[in-house]
Structure formats: C-alpha cells, structure tokens
Amino acid sequence: MDRQVDLVIIGAGPAGMAAALYASRAGLKTLMIDSSAPGGKLLKTYMVENYPGVPAVPGPDLAIAMYQQSVSFGAEYMYGEVEKITKEKQVQLKDGTLINAKAVLIGTGAKERQLNIPGEQDAIGHGESFCAVCDGAFFRNKEVVVIGGGDSALEEAQFLTRFASKVTIVIRRNEFRASDKAQKEVYENDKIHVIKRHVPKEILLTDGKVSGIVLENVEDHMEITVPCQGVFPFIGHIPETSFAKDLGILDENGYIVTNDKMATAIPGIYAAGDCKAKELRQIVTAAADGVVASTEAFHFITGI
Ligand code: NDP
C-alpha cells in the first residue's frame, strides 16, 4: 500500500528519533522506518554515561524513553527495509511498499566492521559476536578475546568481565585509541589482559564453535594462538547507506555528505547521525544532527 507523508525518516536510532520528535511537534506528518526495533546502537550499549542531563542509564532504557517521546506528538514508527530512495523523494521498501514524502531524512547509522579473516563466517553466532550487551551472558566463566583499542572495544571488554573468566584485548599498535578513562579502567581490571602489536589472522573452530584465535605479530610476523570461546571485534563501522548509492551523495567511504544544515546535494534529502560524514560520532551529536535536519526539512516543506 502506498503512503503519503510530509517527512519520512529512515532509521529509528537517536538521530531519527530526535528528528521525529521535532518534526511531529512542529506539525509535520512524520513516519520513521526501521528494519529493527527503535533505538539503534543504544540497544547494544550497556551503559550511557555521557548524555547530558541523564545520569548513567542503560542504553536500552534510554532507547525506550527516546522512542516514547519521539512518538508522543503523533510521529509514527513502522517496520520496513528500505530498498531505494529516488531524487523525487520516493522511498521504496523491500516488501514493495512505496512511501511518497515531501522530504526524506536518512539516519541509518553504521554497522559493525567484520574482521574478514578465515573462520569468521562460520564463527559468527557460534562464539563470534559484535554485541557484548546482547551476548555477554553466554560467556559466563569462559575466555574471550576482544579485538580493537577504541572506546567501544574497551568499554565492551570491561562489560564482558562481568561474565568471562578472562578477557584478552588485542590491538595492532602500541597504544589504545580510547579515552584515558577507559584505558585506566582496563589496566586496573585484573581480568583483562592486553596483547599489543598483533592482528587477527584466523578464527579456529572445534565442533562448530569458536575454540581459539590465531594472531600475527605485526613486526616479526610470528603467529600465536590464543585459546578462547568467544571473539568480539570492535574495529569500527561501515555506514548503512547502500540504498542511497545511486543518488550521488556518498563519499568514497560510503558516508553521506551534507552541509552544516544536514542537507545533501539533493533538495529535500537530509542525513543525520553516524551514517553522515563527520568527525564525532556520539549519541548526543546524532540527536543534535537529527534536530537540525528535521528543522531544515520543516523549512523546506512549509516554505516558512
Ligand atoms: P574507533 O575507530 O575509535 O576504534 C577502532 C579500533 O579498531 C582502533 O583501535 C583500531 O586500531 C582498530 N582496528 C581497526 N581496524 C582494525 C583491523 N582490521 N584489525 C585490528 N584492529 C583494527 O571505533 P569505535 O567503534 O571504538 O568508536 C567509534 C567512535 O565512537 C569514536 O569516536 C569513539 O570515541 C566513539 N565512542 C564513544 C564512546 C563513549 O564516549 N563512551 C563509546 C563508544 C564509542 P588503530 O587504533 O590502530 O587504528
């Protein structure tokens, strides 16, 4: 069934939900579409400590609060997988539904980057996971390996020590990329061990389940095997923008290029949050992008 709305928002993460709140409160007929439950990466975040005005809160709780507020002025949430967006602001879903909108806001975020090493495709779901909050409890009293040295890796490693008997963090340089606070917590945690200057080479499976990971020293190329039952890569993200590839609004890495009003080169099409080319990817910056984008969409639609 075809739908007609003022603003269609693709993605119901912090960017999309903040945009839906502002747009619907300003009187726009607003539809949010997501191929998952509302919340985006908040649903995979154990604890949020840096959303202004909100003391430490579990990510899923913040997601629920944002969602409830985002639909409280009449915005609608709909499950759907977007196949394509046209310059005429028609959004086509994989189930054939067409949504005609006066403006489109893309807030689809980014998905976890995979290691792309032998064994990985068999390991995913059988010991390899990209979400400590979702799967950490499966690793009670087990040994796990976390790959990456950014804030995600260190925070998730810290969380995994609630369950795992040992957490080994593997980084390819001598230094972490994460904040000093996250590094301090890692070094103070007896359950966490760090292996520096190594990269993952292969995930080993026994009877269909992860049983170890082979690491290569980046200097002398010597290999070591770390026995483990879980592998958690946190090595960055890839933007979820494939449905927009024909629009000519992506940079060489697939991120959507906008101006500081979140407008793309196509009038009436906006982008907000982690799917957009920018420096700082945080919950609060995603929400702020969403607010700027929906305000611009309001001006575009109403001419005010
Ligand atoms: P980052 O890009 O910050 O870190 C990625 C890590 O993965 C780096 O240590 C990088 O190594 C490593 N890496 C990348 N590719 C490979 C590879 N092929 N093999 C091995 N290691 C690899 O990503 P994050 O997801 O951690 O963070 C993204 C953004 O979100 C950051 O700005 C971060 O600060 C922010 N964030 C903030 C949080 C907070 O404020 N509480 C929580 C989580 C994230 P190298 O350093 O050598 O390049």
Image: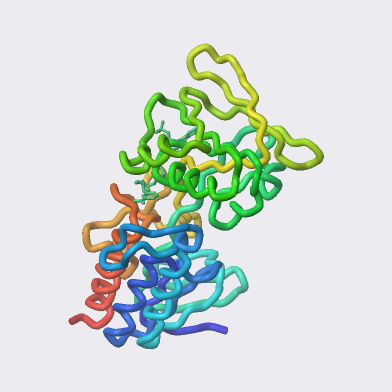
Residue at 44% of width from left, 84% of height from top? Answer: 4
Above or below: residue 175 compared with residue 183: above
Is residue 246 visible to us here? no
Q: Within the image, what quadrant is residue 284 found in?
A: bottom left
Above or below: residue 130 compared with residue 29: above
Residue at 40% of width from left, 78% of height from top? Answer: 101
Q: Within the image, what quadrant is residue 189 found in?
A: top left
Name the quarter where the N terminus is drawn.
bottom right
Above or below: residue 177 compared with residue 50: above
Residue nearest the observer in this picture, 288 or 132: 132
In this picture, residue 56 sits left or right of residue 165: left
Name the quarter where the C terminus is drawn.
bottom left
In percent of width and height, residue 55 lies at 32, 65
Above or below: residue 215 compared with residue 77: above
In percent of width and height, residue 13 lies at 43, 66
Residue at 30% of width from left, 87% of height from top? Answer: 27
In this picture, residue 121 sits left or right of residue 86: right
- Number of numbered labels in the structure image: 0
